[in-house]
Image (cartoon, helix red, strand yellow):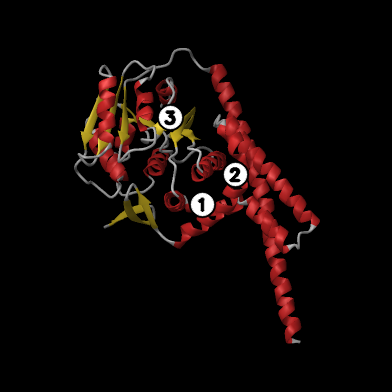
Amino acid sequence: MGICNHDSMIHATIRVIEVVAVFGTISSLGYYGFCIVCAVELLRERKHADEGSRSTQATPPVSIFKPLKGTDPEMYENFRSHCLQDYPEYEIIFGVSEANDPAIQLVERLKGEFPARSIQLIICDESLGPNTKVSNLVQMAKRAKYSFFVVNDSDIRVQRDYLRRVLAPLEQENIGLVTCLYRAIANFTPTSCIESLGIVDFCAAVLSARRVEGGLRFGLGSTLAFRSRDLEAIGGFEALVNYLADDYQLGQRIVERQLAVKLSEVTVETVLPAYTLREFVAHQLRWARTVRTSRPRGYSGFVITFGLFWALLALVFSGAATWAWQLLLTVLVLRIAMMLLMGRGVLQDRQTYKLIWLLPLRDLIAPLFWFASFLGNTVAWRGDRFVVSKGKLAKVI
């Protein structure tokens, strides 16, 4: 009797796992299909925007903020792209928190190459909060000459028409923030290539959130363009200095003022480093915990994006049934279609074709980082460690 009960419990457990796995797989298929719809909608929006675009647009003078700490791959080329803008009047303000930061040499070199360009380098020696980037921005903003601001990360590279296209939507008074998707320039190491696919996947998450919520309610650090008066209305950069995801907080506060966050048709580029395994793990955990603390409900929903994991689980616990093989094949086909549409179509990322063979590996790694993000609340960034609680930072000494 005991043996029979034990066997029945094992059989019931296997059956439950099988049902959960099938439900997870079907949910993932629904998510992939939804992402394809979101991508098609965005591409149609872009087409209509191009057809209705005006040849003349306002070009208000703008201050570009580049907070720096340390160096990134191809950093100088990233800086140069901001000096080559087809735009009548703008300044670039770089900020570092330490006078011996290695990025300073690159800024001085930039000044030498572009003497006619308005470039400032500010040593932001006050520590105004745990988020050093935002602390620097507070001090940089005080030196800005113009009333339109653009903030982007140090690893971002842009096209010559970047400023014209990003600032154009701010002619509409109901738009308070413009932000951009980004594609990766991968260093062809396994970790870099896997992260490049992760960025394509992140694009899908952004577009799905945009449609579910009726518009974006957050910004992306790849580009944040806004008016100085709207920044002042939410308390300035000072209001963000204790938060990990300052880009998310900025967008959320702009929306709370009944202003819209506009997703630009511009896609910028980010140059990925050749991560060591330890650096890759730390970076993925920081990203995962950043999203989890900023958008906890949305992050919990990521569980339905792991289609390959669920399909393999269904295959194993069904005893490799024919229907499970068919389900796995369906997942792979729809998943690849979604990634190619997002990567090549939306992001115009030619690398996606070359890297798609790594997608199964990336999809088996992703659930591990998702789960691990719940096992702690510390993150590492540029050599510092922080404890995160409800989106806020406390530096670990």
Task: Residue lying at the far bottom in this picture: please name it.
Answer: 1
Pick whichever, 184 or 206, lies toward us.
184
* Amino acid marked by disc 2: Leu
- Structural distance between the alpha carbons of marks 3 and 2: 42 Å
Q: Is residue 284 above or below residue 347?
A: below
Identify the element where label 1 is drawn: helix
Q: State which mark lies toward you, 3 or 2.
A: 2
Q: Amino acid at mark 1?
A: Tyr
Amino acid type assigned to the residue bearing label 3 in the image? Asn
Mark 3 and 1 residues: CB-CB less than 8 Å, in contact?
A: no
**In the rendered structure, which disc, 3 or 1, sits on the residue that comes first in sequence?**
3
The image position of residue 270, as x and y in percent, is 44, 35
Residue 330 picture location, percent across and down: 73, 46
Q: Any mark on residue 174, and which?
A: 3
- Circle 2 is placed at which residue position? 358
Give the percent coordinates (x, y) of residue 279: 42, 49
The quarter of the picture where residue 231 lies is top left
Instruction: Tell whether 233 sits left or right of 48.
Output: left
Judge depth for marks 1 and 2 and give the one in front. Answer: 2
Residue hosting label 1: 299
Judge whether 224 appears above or below 87 on screen. below
- Name the mark nearer the viewer: 3 or 1: 1
What percent of the width, then of the height, locates residue 101?
25, 39
